[in-house]
Amino acid sequence: MIRSVEEFNRSIKSVMIAEEEIKDRIAQAAKEIDSWYDGTPILLVSILKGAFVFMADICRAVTVPCEIGFMCAQSYYSGTESSGIVNITMDLDRDVTNYHVVIIEDIIDTGRTLNDVVKLLKARNPKSLRIVTLLDKPARRVVKLEPDVALFTIPDKFIIGYGLDYDEYFRNLPYIAEFNQEEL
Ligand code: IMP
Ligand code: MG
């Protein structure tokens, strides 16, 4: 629990990716998404809460007609193994069979949660399924999962801002920063 603005500010170690840099990469990624579908309508799906800021920006940068959907997912693991059990605490409100689905994710870390969500969505037979992630931390991966697009590949550091939290705080920072572990 953050008790003061001083504590909040001390927790922000340094800016890793500035607002302008994020904006530029989003414009490029949106062009890439547009090029995949050539005007065919798509469904952007993001997993709450972390991806909500990225979703808001990417959906306004693509020009293909798109719908948006949100899911809340929690995965359970024993030790280092994925149980493959993903608990959907909030599901999509429509059938994906008629959609080209693009998952809009905040960060792929171990890859476990997204891997389970991908399995689940594939089982529902969408027309196609692609993954766009804002951040990729490949050094931490424990399951084989490759995004179609990663806007930034980052080292194994705990980061905050632009939707990502520590203890539910910092999601509202407009940039991506390294979290100051000394504040833990
Ligand atoms: P995974 O199942 O290990 O890939 O977990 C990914 C989820 O963990 C992300 O969607 C984030 O919510 C969270 N996460 C992973 N790394 C970070 C980080 O550096 N900062 C904040 N949240 C993170
Ligand atoms: Mg997330």
Image: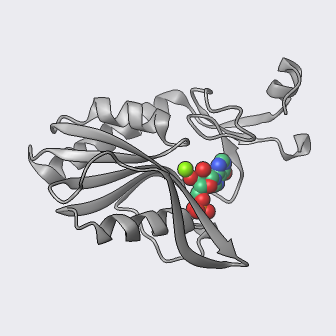
The correct choice, above or below, for 182 with respect to 112 in the image is above
Question: Looking at the picture, how far across and down is residue 138, in whole percent?
Answer: 56, 66
Q: Quadrant of residue 124?
A: bottom left
The correct choice, above or below, for 94 with respect to 149 in the image is above
Residue sitting at x 73%, y 36%? 14
| Side of 161 where 66 appears, left or right | left
Question: Looking at the picture, how far across and down is residue 93, in whole percent?
Answer: 32, 45
Q: Residue furthest top?
A: 5
Residue sitting at x 17%, y 62%? 127
Question: Looking at the picture, how far across and down is residue 94, in whole percent?
Answer: 26, 48
Q: Quadrant of residue 120?
A: bottom left
- Residue 118 visible somewhere in the drawing: yes
| Side of 42 where 180 appears, left or right | right
Of the 4 image quadrants, the one containing the N terminus is top right
Residue sitting at x 24%, y 36%? 62
Question: Looking at the picture, how far across and down is residue 91, in whole percent?
Answer: 41, 50
Residue sitting at x 81%, y 25%? 9
Q: How many badges with numbers are in the image?
A: 0
Q: Nearer the viewer, residue 184 or 71?
A: 71
Q: Residue furthest left?
A: 39
The correct choice, above or below, for 128 with respect to 106 in the image is below
- Residue 154 visible somewhere in the drawing: no
| Side of 70 where 82 appears, left or right | right
Of the 4 image quadrants, the one containing the C terminus is top right
